[in-house]
Image (cartoon, rainbow, N blue to C red):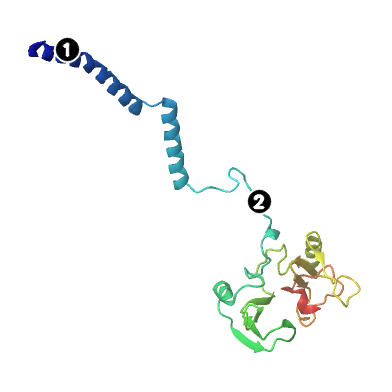
């Protein structure tokens, strides 16, 4: 076989193999680029969901609309001040007291600060804890969230409160105390129809013309 024939045979083989190489290379490239549309859609969808979840906060009970909250679901308060409130928040709500006294505390369990305000409101705070232990008022400006206000008719106020709360019976009383209501967690609401009786807060028989003259939030432990 001459050298020319050998070269011609090799060239012919190369021409025959070349289309096959192009076919194999094209199939491999097609597999890498043209993936199954279903797989591509799934990948895109997961990417979108991840972006949305990272941008939007997840809501608890999403789609549920809560019922209207009753006034009795919030912490009992007078003028926006509740038992256990810190002194700094009291100052923010009511301002600084017009008069301040410090006493040993006795049955309050710690020395106390007594804050007097010009509108007839008095707060007792723990000297150490700096938290409200008791709040009492005769001011019509000090509204409560308990369904009773200063100057309300006494009989009507008692009827309304008895529908919501149980009247308190002390350790040394034989029957429930009129106008003393248990609010839960040891808290008491006391409504008085004679503001002059500040010492014991005990109400006598309620007359038709009597009105609420004093409202007090306190703890049952201070009066047992």
| 10 Å crowding of disc 2: few (<14), some (14-19), many (20+) | few
Residue 87 sits in which quadrant?
bottom right
Residue 13 lies left or right of residue 108; in this view the side is left
Image position, residue 151 (x, y; %): 73, 69
Give the residue at x 63% y 88%.
Answer: 101
Q: What element carries label 2?
A: loop
Q: Which of 86 and 27 is in front in this view?
A: 27
Q: What element carries label 1?
A: helix
Q: Nearer the viewer, residue 19 or 59?
A: 19
Residue 17, compared with residue 111, is above or below; it is: above
Q: Name the mark on residue 37.
A: none
Q: Mark 1 points at which residue?
A: 12
The answer for how far apart the CA atoms under marks 1 and 2 are is 90 Å
Residue 46 sits in which quadrant?
top left
Residue 14 lies left or right of residue 25; in this view the side is left
Residue 185 sits in which quadrant?
bottom right
> Which quarter of the figure is the N terminus placed in?
top left
């Amino acid at each position: 076989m001459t050298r020319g024939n050998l070269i011609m045979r090799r060239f012919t083989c190369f021409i025959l193999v070349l289309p096959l190489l192009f076919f194999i290379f094209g199939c491999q490239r097609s597999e890498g680029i043209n993936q199954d549309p279903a797989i591509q859609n799934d990948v895109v969808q997961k990417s979108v969901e991840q972006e949305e979840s990272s941008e939007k906060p997840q809501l608890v009970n999403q789609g549920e609309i809560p019922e209207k909250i009753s006034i009795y679901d919030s912490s009992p308060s007078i003028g926006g001040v509740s038992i256990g409130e810190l002194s700094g928040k009291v100052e923010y709500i009511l301002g600084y007291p017009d008069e301040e006294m410090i006493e040993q505390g006795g049955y309050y369990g710690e020395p106390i600060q007594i804050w007097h305000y010009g509108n007839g409101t008095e707060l007792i705070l723990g000297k150490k804890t700096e938290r409200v232990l008791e709040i009492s008022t005769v001011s019509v400006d000090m509204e409560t969230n308990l369904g009773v206000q200063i100057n309300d008719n006494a009989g009507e106020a008692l009827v309304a409160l008895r529908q919501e709360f149980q009247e308190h019976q002390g350790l040394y009383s034989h029957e429930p105390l009129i106008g003393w209501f248990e609010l839960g967690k040891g808290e008491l609401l006391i409504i008085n129809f004679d503001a002059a009786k500040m010492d014991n807060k005990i109400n006598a028989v309620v007359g038709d013309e009597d009105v609420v003259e004093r409202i007090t939030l306190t703890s049952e432990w201070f009066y047992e």
